[in-house]
Amino acid sequence: MLWQFSGDAPIYSQLIEQIKVGIVSGVFPPGERLPSVRDLATEAGVNPNTMQRALTELERDGLVYSQRTAGRFVTEDKAMIETAKRALAERHINAFLDAMTRLGYQREEVINMLRQEITGGGNGDVSLAV
Amino acid sequence: MSVLQCNGLTKRYGKVPALEQVNLTVEPGRIVGLLGPNGSGKTTLIKLANGLLTPSEGELLICGAAPGRATHALVSYLPERTCIPTWMSARQLLDFYGDFYPDFRRDAAEEMLRHLDIPDTLRVKQMSKGTREKVQLIMVMSRQARLYLLDEPIGGVDPATRDYILSTIISNYNPEAAVVISTHLISDVEKVLDEVIFINRGQIMLQSSVDEIREEKGMSVDALFREVFKC
Amino acid sequence: MLRKLLKHEFRATGRVMLPMILILLATSVAANLSLRYLMDSRAWFLTMLGGLLLMAFVFAIIGVCVVAFVLMIQRFYKNLLQDEGYVMLTLPVSIHQHIWSKLIVSAAWFALTALAVLLACCITAFDITIIKEILWGLGKIFQELREVQAYYAINGTAILVELIVLAFLSVVSMCLQFYAALAAGHSLPNHKMAWSVVWYFGLQFAFQIIAFSVISGLDHLNFFDWGVFHPDIHLSAMAGIHIGLLLMVFLTVVHGAIFYVITTFFLKKRLNLE
């Protein structure tokens, strides 16, 4: 997994986000045991306490559950993972739409451009013509 | 009990103050960044904690005791410069640390040396600068100390070594112990830290948690540092 | 912990001193052979080789003494006051233990060096007629002395022991004077070595002044007309020598103790590693 952090948001919230992506995309499959806090922290290059905090938060959301002796596991509830996936997707779409609005595009234009980009082999000039 | 506590700590060299009325505490389980520009008093503070300097005023306590022979057994110190005896081989270095520190985990150190492909018989003299720094860090982090004082552990090393050093610090994390890392290379260590202490001209400017800074100020510690210490 | 410090100190110094002592013994064997066989040879190059071997022996003696001396200073300076000091002075060990370990190891090497030089000289002299004759003569004189009067033999041995003790203590005190000067000089921010030299000669000078003023002060108080010094008390020459030597032993110990206190003070309170 590739861990990357931006400057502004708290690190634990970025960790939550990235672990969610890991779960949704199947890097951490449903029902699988997660690596230990220390291993995850070492891999991500972050403070173990921060990693602990992120995992606790994920536990509260239900995406992760812990068994006292065996460690932490990804939830087996596929519906819950699907919801999380949906929520992440919505966040990306909203961010994208916000960016496009700032560039001055109307919703219709955005939809057209998207359609062209996906189906028509993409006319790169569209984005450059701005 | 706090691992490190300073009450009104002042150190002057002649009349020049290097630290003025410093009050701070470091709790167990925390990884703390001691951040400040060059000459801000970071090294002076760390030397005081190691008993290599004596305070002019105030006190500094390690697990409740003033620095001395007893606290040396609790503190694992990585000095600013590499200073392991150069005539020793890696094995002799292991003997040395094992003899003097009951908390030295020889097997852990050997494992880390093996991982770096450093043979037992290689003398420190024959090692490259980067290897020496790594070996010294391995000796320091292989102890099960209560307080790790790392003075500029990532200054002057290449980015790969920097990553190695930081991951060694993380993978040896112990909830009973505190780690203090002094540096001016903030963006590199920021992710590793719980807390930061900003120090300038011998005075503490700020002590706060990293995520608090990011949450409240909406900027990274690095950005905040640049703002606070703008020339 | 002192035991462990000693172990590592011997490790650090032994890797230099042991080869030096081995070289010395090897050259002494060579010197012996050259004295016995080569020097009388008719072939000029054999004579020259013999001369070179003898010279090597002399240089080895000088070398081992110089190295023992330099090592004494260098171990203290490099191991405690330079970069290695960061490691050494943060060990869970007291300053006293540090000083004692350095002192004991240096003194041990000086003693071993003296023994090695003695042994090397014996090896060199082995089976050489003229030296055998001298030694035989000396033994004879001693033997006769003992037969004439046991008094001289016993006192002779006692004086020898006293002289050895005095020499050993003087060496220890000399080490401590170097340690004190180095520790004091290195407490200053700049020109540490230059200040150490100044301190060394300063201490030397101060002690001469003190010794001089104490003696003249005592003289002023008519101290030397009192007790054992009283002109009416007639001491035998032997007793005088013993008292003089023991007094010197005592003064050397005081001398060393003062340097020890200075060294500990600067290492504990005025440490200033770069």
Image: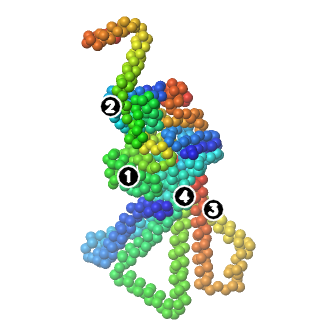
The local crowd at label 2, few if under 14, some if 14 to 19, many if 20 or more residues have their Cα within 10 Å, is some
Q: Which mark is residue B107?
A: 1
Q: Tell me: residue B82, above or below residue C181.
A: above
The image shows residue B39 at horizontal and vertical percentages of 54, 38
The residue at 50%/26% (across/down) is B219
For mark 2, what is the residue?
A29
Q: Residue flagged by tag 3: what amino acid is it?
A: Ala
Q: Residue flagged by tag 1: what amino acid is it?
A: Asp
Q: CA distance from mark 2 to mark 4?
A: 56 Å
For mark 4, what is the residue?
C94
Q: Earlier in the sequence, mark 3 or mark 4?
A: 4
Q: Which mark is residue C206?
A: 3
Q: Nearer the viewer, residue B4 or C266?
A: B4
Which image quadrant is residue C65 in?
A: bottom left
Q: Tell me: residue B117, above or below residue A24.
A: below
Co-location on one chain, circles 1 and 4? no
Chain at tag 1: B
C67 left or right of C96 in image: left
Which callout, 2 or 4, points to the residue nearer the camera?
Answer: 2
Which callout, 3 or 4, points to the residue nearer the camera?
Answer: 4
The residue at 44%/53% (across/down) is B104
Q: Residue flagged by tag 2: what amino acid is it?
A: Pro
Helix, strand or loop at mark 2: loop
Q: CA distance from mark 1 to mark 4?
A: 28 Å
Which callout, 2 or 3, points to the residue nearer the camera?
Answer: 2
Helix, strand or loop at mark 4: loop
